[in-house]
Amino acid sequence: MSQKEPVAEKSLESVLRDIAKGKGAPCYLLYGDEDFLVEEALGKLVDAIVPEQDRDLSLFVMDDDSTGVDPVCEALLTPSLIPGPKVVLLPKTRLFYSKTSLPELVRKIADSAETDLPAAARAFMIFLDLSGWTLEQLRDDGWRRLTDEQWRDIAGGEGGEDREKWLPRVVEYCAGQGTMAGRHRAGGTEVLEELLSSGLPEGHCLVMTADSVDRRKRLFKVVSEKGVVLPFIRTRSEARQRSLMMENLREKLARRGKTLTSEAWIVLGKKTGFRLRDSAEALDQLITYTGDRTVIEPADVETVIGRTRDDSVFDLTEALVGKDLRKALASLGDLLYQNVHHLVILAMITREVRFLFHGKLFLDTGRIGGFRADMDYGPFQRAVYPAVKGLEAELGKGKSLASQHPYVVYNALRNSTRFSYGELMGHLELVLAADAAMKSTGQDPRLLLERLLVELCGQAGTSS
């Protein structure tokens, strides 16, 4: 195994240099829990291998979950439709899991059940596939019949003591996702292993990403020997997390001609937990907020991101506007994990829907001149916000959109242009119905909130 380690330890930069020199590998595996880095690296890798103009005919994105590896091998062997490289991409593949991965999967499920329920559900379906248990066995309180000994036999004791905190919620969620149930990986990986060992046709390449891997699997060893393995594992050191965040986001800042002070970097990291995806999204908001200013200060982070991380209003608004159920449920999980009361969360959602409705009314009545959905924050403050502020006297101070911080008004107006009047009226009816159900029935508040988010996002997360 030692002779293969140098291959697995290659850096992304050296891999890209090799490709530029015409020394690309026949297969690549990018894996790890730093999913933001995996996706960034995947984009750069595909950019380096396949010219953008050729991707419709030379880049094939496949799913091995339900079909197994046979169609993947067939795609790898089929001649390319046009001259040049051909890439078969397997994102989020299960092929590198094994029963020894079960304890790691349980950790992932338990860790993400509160903050990213869809990710926890995906990992849980893999867990069921490997363990031999079924969703039908565990749903409707069937999970309670599992003994500690049975759990230890499967999961090695991982997550056993507190499984009642996360297992029923994940089971319930999976049971509600009809498309997720019954997805099992077909067949083994022997055919793919033999194909990679014997060599792919000239110019053909297999690219895979995975959350985690069992390094003892033969497929992993074959990929390590014949190709390149790039791990992206989340570091536990805060100093390293901060360094990694800065390294990966400075390019984004440079493209917009901006910098963060050293203190602002620290505040940003603290607010986002140094999670790269959250930090990148937060940086987008800071770039917009600071307008023409080139230096982002700690006060900017506190104003924009501080509010975002403390009450998740911005995260939740962005998710609802984009109909991003995954992000909405993750924001809900964050709030519940911080012990924010369910009625407070509902009030946040109601407030944001109401502001979107107000924004739609302001624009439709023609009371605000000069507003454009693509205008920057600085011009908005100078040219538009005074007109909005002028409506405050008519509407009364307090809960109307006109009384809010100009940045809140700016986002509400921009986002309201993405909805029709009828859609927002429907959203108001949904939040009022959820409020009535929460205060007058014995239903689980968490499930009521999750159901509300599903409805507000238009079933966006259940149509896969």
Image (cartoon, helix red, strand yellow):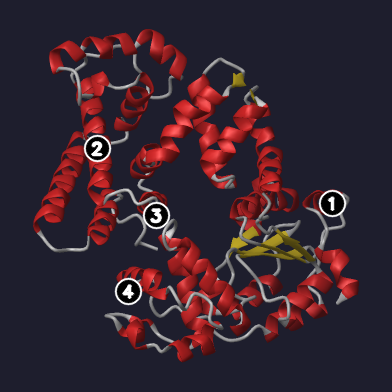
Q: Which of marks 4 and 1 is in front?
A: 4
Dividing the picture into quadrants, the one containing residue 379 is top left
Q: Name the residue under label 3.
A: 337
Q: Name the residue under label 2.
A: 353
Q: Earlier in the sequence, mark 2 or mark 1?
A: 1
Q: Please, is residue 190 above or below residue 44 in the view?
A: below
Q: Earlier in the sequence, mark 4 or mark 3?
A: 4
Mark 4 to mark 3: distance in Å? 23 Å
Mark 3 to mark 1: distance in Å? 41 Å
Q: Residue at x 75, y 79 (%)?
A: 195
Instruction: Give 406 or 210, whichever is nearer the viewer.
Output: 406
Could you tell me the amino acid type at mark 4?
A: Ala
Residue 175's disc number: 4
Could you tell me the amino acid type at mark 3?
A: Tyr
Q: Which residue is drawn at 68% across and 27% down?
A: 254
Q: Is residue 285 left or right of residue 263?
A: left
Could you tell me the amino acid type at mark 1?
A: Ser
Q: SS class of the residue under badge 3?
A: helix
